[in-house]
Amino acid sequence: MASIQKISGKKGDRWKAVVRRKGFGTQTQTFGKKKDAETWARSIDTKIDNGALMVSGETKRTTVGELIDRYIAEVIPQKKSGKVQKQQLLRWRDLLGELRLMSLTPNRILQARSQIAAQNTRYGVPITNATVNRYHAALSHVLKMAEMQYGLIESNPIRKVTKLKEPQGRVRYLSEDELTALHGACADDSNPFILTIVSMAIATGMRQGEILNLKWSDLDLTRQTALIEEPKNGQRRAVFLIEPIVESLRILKANSDGKSEYLFPGKSNLKPIYIKSAWIRVSKAAKLNDFRFHDLRHTTGSYLAMSGASVPQITAVLGQRSHQMAFRYAHLSDASTQAVVEKTMSKIFGDAK
């Protein structure tokens, strides 16, 4: 974008033309007349648009690997999921790192992505489309920074690369018998926190990380709320706590030694507790098959749907940004939906029976 700046000096006024375009650096020239400065600026814009002006030296020199290294150093430390994304970006750097940015095309990205999709996980199973799409998203944000912030590319080539189709997410939730068995297993376990943690997960739909990172300063037990400052989707939300959970937290606080700010502190009191071992024990004791901690969140959504909660209500409880994820529970509300329709329409058409 061109701008004309007036420069006043002892010898009179001069006019400085400045043209800034992404990938081409800053072009400047000073003239005695404003009209000449405007004409020059237009000519530079025209040359850039027609491809007659070469890209800046920085864009010519910068490789994909150098861009990724810069992103890892400047952006990754600010991201909650930075550790995972760093590993993803290092894989992109292995595949595309030596390529110049100006030579990065959608086809080269597709070729590299195919190599990523062909690899296996550390458990020896094929990588899923959903995981490949997470790799795609990581590189996409790097290139977005190169375009919008660093001014190294004129357009983002990954925009022309479509993501892979993902299967509909699973919905595994606890039956009433499984709920009873899990509650008993947690109550009998040696971990003093696991019963409250699991109960909170079921009653609120909170993610494991959200629960474990809760601090006493986040709670208002009088109002029965917990404030989540940094949930996964980047928004702050207040979570309602039912009375049994509030009572458990009151007892927990009364028995706390006050040395940690966390509700569920680890041995050092400086970090939250690590519950992987405890979760494996209680899952085994309750004889749960194909069930992960995150499925407790699905349990919340499923029982809300079966109780007649709407998709927007489920979305609000689970703290989701859009209704898309909550729609997976919609089929579970078929019975309550039928009852609502029958009740409403009976007023119009009379009792069908």
Image (cartoon, rainbow, N blue to C red):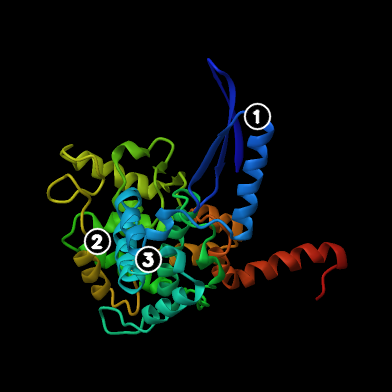
- The mark lying in front, picked from 1 and 2, is 1
Q: How far apart are labels 1 and 2 at the CA level?
A: 84 Å
Can you tell which mark lies on residue 33? 1
At label 1, counting other C-alpha atoms closer than 10 Å, the crowd grade (few under 14, some 14-19, many 20 or more) is few
Left or right of 259: which side holds 227?
A: right
Which residue, given by chain and number where applicable, does mark 2 sit on? 187
Which residue, given by chain and number where applicable, does mark 3 sit on? 294
When asked about the image quadrant of residue 37, the answer is: top right
Q: How far apart are labels 3 and 2 at the CA level?
A: 20 Å
Q: Position of residue 12 (x, y in %)?
A: 58, 18
Nearer the observer, 125 or 324: 125
Q: Earlier in the sequence, mark 3 or mark 2?
A: 2
Q: Position of residue 276 (x, y in %)?
A: 22, 65
Nearer the observer, 348 or 193: 193
Q: Earlier in the sequence, mark 1 or mark 2?
A: 1
At label 2, counting other C-alpha atoms closer than 10 Å, the crowd grade (few under 14, some 14-19, many 20 or more) is some
Q: Amino acid at mark 2?
A: Ala
Q: How far apart are labels 3 and 1 at the CA level?
A: 68 Å
- The mark lying in front, picked from 3 and 1, is 1
Q: Position of residue 137 (x, y in %)?
A: 45, 64
> Which residue is at 57% across, 64% downward?
324
